[in-house]
Amino acid sequence: MAYIDQEIERYVELKPLEGDFCEGSVKVQDGPGLYFWLMQRAYNVQVLAPQAVQEKLVRMLKNTLSLYEQSGE
């Protein structure tokens, strides 16, 4: 974990994994702000649970990707 935002450490319980990875656990409210925050982090974060949040995030990402696939570019 070469870099972890000091602000995040106050809210997220982190467990170091192999290499430069970690697993974090945090309690949040489900809402637009959560998904906006997750999408801002792109491939730097993966939602492991709950499944409902993971599924909604996947739907939102697929919808976003479809906007670019439909444009033909």
Image (cartoon, helix red, strand yellow):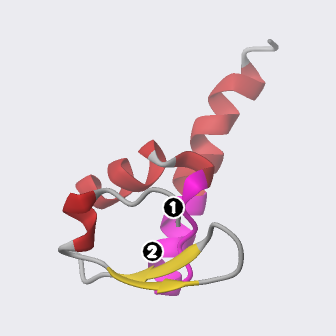
Q: Position of residue 54 (x, y in %)?
A: 53, 73
Q: Amino acid at mark 1?
A: Leu
Q: Is residue 63 left or right of residue 57?
A: right
Residue for point 26% across, 71% down: 9
Residue for point 76% across, 27% down: 69
Bounds of the magenta segment = 44-58
Please, which residue is most extreme toward the right here?
A: 72
- What residue is disc 1 on? 57
Q: Is residue 59 above or below residue 26?
A: above
* Magenta stretch: includes residue 37: no
Q: Position of residue 41 (x, y in %)?
A: 48, 48
Which quadrant holds residue 14?
bottom left
Q: Quadrant of the C terminus?
A: top right
- Which of the pair 27/24 is nearer the observer? 24
Q: Position of residue 19 (x, y in %)?
A: 71, 72
- Asked if residue 31 can be seen in this view, the reply is no
- Asked if residue 34 can be seen in this view, the reply is yes
Question: Alpha-carbon distance for marks 1 and 2?
Answer: 6 Å
Q: Residues within 10 Å of mark 1 (few under 14, many from 20)?
A: some
- What residue is disc 2 on? 53
